[in-house]
Amino acid sequence: MLRGIYRQEVAESFARHYQSTVRCVWDVRTFLGEGPVWDARTQALHFVDIKGADLLSFRERGVNSIRPVSGGLSAVFLTSTRRLLCATTRGLELPPYGPLHHRILTPIELGRSGNRTNDGKCDARGRVWIGTMDAREKTFSGALYRIDNDATVSLVIDDVGVSNGLDWSPDGRTFYYTDSMRRVIWRFEFDMESGTVRRREIFATVPEGHGVPDGLTVDAEGFVWSAHWDGWRVTRYDPDGAVERVLWLPVPRVTSVCFGGPKLDTLYITSARIGLRDEQLEEAPMSGSLFDCRPGVVGCPPNVSKIEATPFPPLMGDPI
C-alpha cells in the first residue's frame, strides 16, 4: 500500500489511463489565484487573486467580473444570501453589496504581525476555518483557526508553516489539512458537533521534484484532490493516501481546486504566475489562468457560512 508515499511510476501510469482534457476557461492571468468556491445560486465560480487583491467571479455562460478588495484578501466564503464573506489580514469581513456597507465582523489573528491569512473553508455547521502563515514564508508562525457562528475565534492548530488546503470527508468524520512548508497533508478525526480535531496522522507527503501540496478538495467518493505548486499537476489520492491519478496542467504553479457546474461534475483549477521568470512564462504563458476538466466524478456541495446572520457591535474603525 502506498500510504502517504508518492510513487512517480505509479502516478504516471494512472495519469496516462485517467488523464482528462484540461482546458483554459479564463485566460485571466492572476498573480496568485486561489480559493475557488462554486455558488450554485448564481452559477458562478468565485476565487481570489491574493497578490492582486481581487475577488474574481467566473460564469460559463455570462459575464465574468473582477472586483478589488483591499486589506490582504486571501479567501472567500458563501453565505445564506448572495453576499460573500471574505478573509483578509484585517479579519473576517463583508465587502459592500448593493446598499449594504462594508462590515468587519471579527479579527482573526492578533499578536502575530508578520503573518497573513491564507486558505479557508466552511464546515457543514457554517463555521469558518481559516489558516495563517508567515508572509515571508520563513518561520512556522502560522496557525489554523475556527470561527464559530457567534464570531468567536478559536486556535485549533499551531506551529504551522504555510497553512493551506483543507476539507472534510463526505460523512464529515475526517478532516484534511495541508502545511505546504512541511510538504504534508494531515488527516484528523473530526467531531462535527464540537468542531474539534484529534489523532493527527500523515495522509500524504510530496517529495522534492513533485511540487508542493497547495489547495485541495474532497469529492463525493471521499477521494482527495490536491493541487501541486511547482508540480504542473493535480493529484487525486484515495482515502488511504495512495495516488489514484494525476491531472497534468500546462502551467507549473497549480494552486487550488474545487468542483462546480450544475451537476458538480466540473473540476475547476486555479493557478499563479507570481515569481516566474520571463523564460518560464514563455514556456507556460497561461500561468495564472483558470482551468477546468471533467474527471468523471462529482464533488460535494460547498458549505455556507452562518456567521453573517448574527448582528455584531461595530469594531474600532468599522464603517457602518
Image (tube, grey):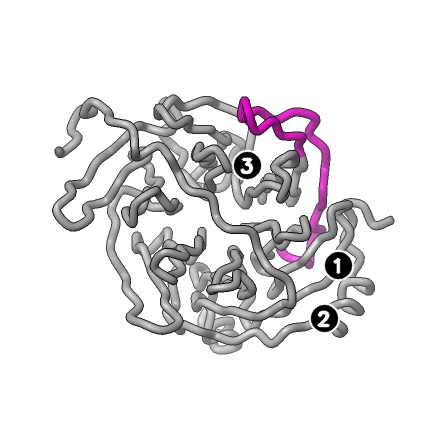
Q: Which residues are magenta?
A: 188-212
- Residue drawn at x 68%, y 52% is 221
Residue carrying label 1? 244
**Residue 87 visible, this orientation:** yes
For numbered disc 2, what is the local secondary structure?
helix
Q: Mark 1 to mark 3: distance in Å? A: 27 Å
Q: Residue at x 59, y 39 (%)?
A: 177
Residue 162 position in % (x across, y down) = 52, 40
Q: Are marks 2 and 1 in contact (CB under 8 Å)?
A: yes
Q: Residue furthest right?
A: 1
Mark carried by residue 39 = none
Tell which of 276 and 162 is nearer to you.
Answer: 162
Residue matched to label 2: 18
Residue 77: image x %, image y %?
39, 45
Q: Residues within 10 Å of mark 3 (few under 14, many from 20)?
A: many
Q: Amino acid at mark 2?
A: Tyr
Q: Nearer the viewer, mark 3 or mark 2?
A: 2
Per the rendering, the mark at residue 161 is 3
Percent of width and height locating residue 207: 71, 51
User: For mark 1, does the 10 Å Cα neighbourhood hold few (<14), some (14 to 19), or many (20 or more) residues?
Assistant: some
Q: Mark 1 or mark 2, which is nearer the start of the sequence?
A: 2
Image quadrant where residue 19 sits: bottom right
